[in-house]
Structures are given as structure tokens and as C-alpha cells.
Amino acid sequence: MTDYAKMVREQRDIHGRPMQTFEINGKKIKTNLGDWRCAMWDGNDVPAKYTFPNGRCRGLGFGESMDEAFIKAVEAGWTEIRFVDISTSIRGYHRVYVWLHR
């Protein structure tokens, strides 16, 4: 299995924008994986492009890393993969979600 996540982390322009485009298997993949400025949202007002039928949002699975989620998303054919830290109703707790778009 190819480690697309490692490739993205190594090729990322650390001074560039959070969402950057990388070419993986001949496809242009736009992602914020490896960006030190982690997006933090409250979970409200999800952009329309991340909703069904062209998009999807899911939380990271138990024990699943962002790298594993990124590799699964690339292999599933998603072309925009955004990681978002979303606050919960419990003070101080957060959960990482993967927002996907084709």
C-alpha cells in the first residue's frame, strides 16, 4: 500500500494555504492534511458541497489516525479531503471529522 499521507506531509508548502492540491495517481487531491493551522468549527452550517450526494462527513473511527482516514478517502475516490476539529457539547472535548467532496 502506498503511503499517500506521508507524501502529502513531505510535499506540503508549510507557508502556503491550509488547503493545498497534490497529484496522487493522476488525480488532483485537495486537502489540509498536515497543516499546522488545524481548522476548528462548531459543527453548525456545514457547507453544501460536503453533503449528500456529492459529499460526506464522518468522524474518525476509534483508534483511526488522520493518515489512515486520508489513505482510505483517496482510495475511495474523494478529491477534496478536509480534516476539521469540532467542539462537542462537553467543555474541553473535541472530535476530528473528515469532510469529503467529489
Image (cartoon, grey):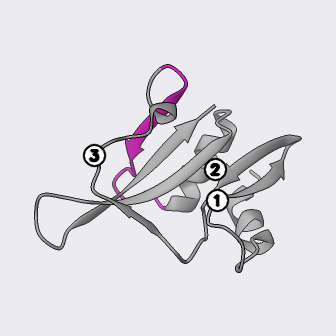
Q: Distance from label 2 to label 3 (Cα)? A: 26 Å
Q: Mark 2 points at which residue?
A: 71
In this picture, which residue range is highlighted in magenta? 53-65
Q: Which of marks 2 and 3 is nearer the N terminus?
A: 3
Q: What residue type is labelled 1?
A: Met
The kind of secondary structure element at disc 2 is helix
Q: Do the residues labelled 2 and 3 touch (CB within 8 Å)?
A: no
Q: What residue type is labelled 2?
A: Ile
Which circle, 1 or 2, is nearer the viewer?
Answer: 1
Q: Name the residue under label 1.
A: 19
Find residue 15 and report its horizontal and vertical position in percent. Answer: 71, 80
Residue 84 versus residue 38 in the image, above or below: above
Find residue 54 and report its horizontal and vertical position in percent. Answer: 55, 24
Give the residue at x 55% y 77%.
36
Q: Name the residue under label 3.
A: 44
Q: How crowded is mark 2: few (under 14 residues within 10 Å), some or many (20 or more)?
A: some
Q: Which of marks 1 and 2 is nearer the N terminus?
A: 1
Q: Which amino acid does label 3 sit on?
A: Asn
